[in-house]
Amino acid sequence: MHRLTAILTIGLVCLLAGSCSQGERKISLEFRYKPGMKLTYDQLSKRNTSVIEHDTVTHMDTMSYRVGIEQEVLRFVDDSTAEILETDIFKYVKPKPKDSVGPPDSVTENQQVTLQMLPDGKIVNFKFADDSNMPRIAYIKNYYEQGIPIFPSGQRAPGYSWTQTTKVVLPDESMEASTTFLIKSLVREGGYDCAVIQYEGNMLIPVEADPADSTKRSGVDHIKTSGVLYFAYTEGFVVEQKEKWKIDGDRSQIRKGKTVNFKVKTDYDVDYRLVKVSGI
């Protein structure tokens, strides 16, 4: 995924002189966007996937890809909601069939999404430039609701934690997804005073069938997440984020008129870094 799969965690180090300790220093966590601001990030993602059917691995693949991400703050739609245009450029090597010859193909793909975000990080609206893939958009919407951290209000010190819980409605039942965030420390990172937030949690994301897919493939992803995020608390933006996803996916599809169940297991590693800032 693009930056939308990138999540927040923060580390804090008190640099005050004298007898001040980290536990005594308090900071505010909020995005401080303003029109004209541009943030450029580099994201490297690595993925390992296995497909399992009747206890047998039927397919395995490994893939890595790099994403260049630019976030441009367009305007404020009201006193607190920033509208941000995010442009993602994906670069990856496309595997070739076993019986083909020659080097694999290098692929570049572009994607744009407009986000409306509150200072605490909550995304209240979004729209892709290409909104034809509704199952993908539904998946991302669930990710925004479950996986994006919403910062606590007020002044907080290292050691403070909070938990976000979301009710997830599945076809046969309702369940809860939750993630716990911890302000671990205050540090100097990438030239900025940062809060380091560690987090662990789980997400439950339905996979809707694509109307264009005659096999009606669908299911649900059970996702365990862990990561750390460096947040520049004075300037109000993410400096770096490292995250791991462990996905256990339940799937079904129609084959020759019969429903076939199988599992998809995926490990993701994501490294997301700020490379340039302008307009601040």
Image: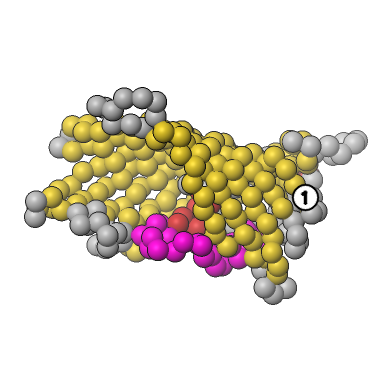
Q: Position of residue 98 (x, y in %)?
A: 26, 27
Q: Position of residue 201 (x, y in %)?
A: 47, 46
Looking at the rendering, the stretch of residues picked out in magenta corresponds to 115-139
Does residue 200 appear anywhere in the picture? no
Left or right: 170, with 269 as reference point: left
Residue 119 on the magenta segment: yes
- The outermost residue toward the front is 102
Q: Nearer the viewer, residue 191 or 36?
A: 36
Left or right: 71, with 207 as reference point: right
At 38% across and 53% down in the image, what residue appears?
Answer: 204
Residue 221 on the magenta segment: no
Left or right: 240, with 103 as reference point: right
Residue that badge 1 annotates:
278
At 87% across and 39% down in the image, what residue appears?
Answer: 16
- Colouring of the image: secondary structure
Does residue 60 appear anywhere in the picture? yes
Q: Nearer the viewer, residue 165 or 89?
A: 89
Query: What amino acid is at disc 1?
Result: Ser
- Image quadrant of residue 99? top left
Q: Does 128 appear above or below 227?
A: below
